[in-house]
Image (cartoon, rainbow, N blue to C red):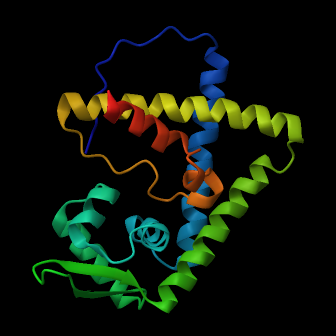
Amino acid sequence: MTQSYNHPVAVSASPRLDNLLVSLSLNLAEESVAALEDASGLAGSAALALLALEEFLGDAHVGHVAEVLGLTHSGAVRLVTQLEAAGFAERRPGEDRRRVEVRLTAAGRRAAAAARAARDAVVRETTGGLGPRDAAALERLLTKLVEARVEARAERRRESGDSRAWWCRTCDFAACGRPEGRCPAQMTARRLSDQ
């Protein structure tokens, strides 16, 4: 699905900064996804689904899996079939028997842990050389950037019904501070929903 961005473009304070950010984010994403896929033996959405199912989608119905991952219902059904074939997930009847719920098997939880560790290793190769002050400064700046992107995504959803995947679908909630109310995506979404 191609997304149209018809918002006025702000003048860049630093074209070099913009270029470096795009270059880093694109290549870090590609390398992280490759690490996820290699560690899990799965490709595309299936590898990402492992992390979401492991972190917060356990016992979720297939429709919720579709919503979180930005898939059609039939796409989520195919994805669950792929996870089942790999021995990583199982379907079971939901509470009202009209819905099918999905949960990871023990093998799926092990694959999710390995995939997350592989992804995290790629990121640590990137940030590992930062000293404490630089790391804290980068964390503050990234928090602001996440807040800005979540606001922009929420605006697109309000205007066009954009059903893009959830922001936090592959996050480690403990690492981002979500249980303590420190997740910038969650805090921004909550603030916007309260308006």
Quadrant location of the C terminus?
Answer: top left
Residue under the point 19% across and 32% down: 160
Image x and y of residue 180, in percent? 59, 51
In depth, the one of 50 and 100 nearer the eye is 100
- The picture quadrant where one finds residue 1 is top left
Q: Disc count in the image?
A: 0
- Residue at 61 percent of width and 56 percent of height: 31
- Asked whether residue 172 appears in the rendered view, the answer is no
**Residue at x-position 66% and y-position 19%:** 16
Residue 94 visible in the current orientation: yes
Compared to residue 40, the image places residue 5 above or below, namely: above
| Occupied quadrant, residue 158 | top left
Left of 96 or right of it: where is 117?
Answer: right
Q: Nearer the viewer, residue 161 or 48?
A: 161
Q: Is residue 161 above or below residue 6?
A: below
Residue 133 percent location from the top left of the image: 87, 35
122 left or right of 180? right
Relative vertical location of residue 173 with respect to residue 43 in this rendering, above or below: above
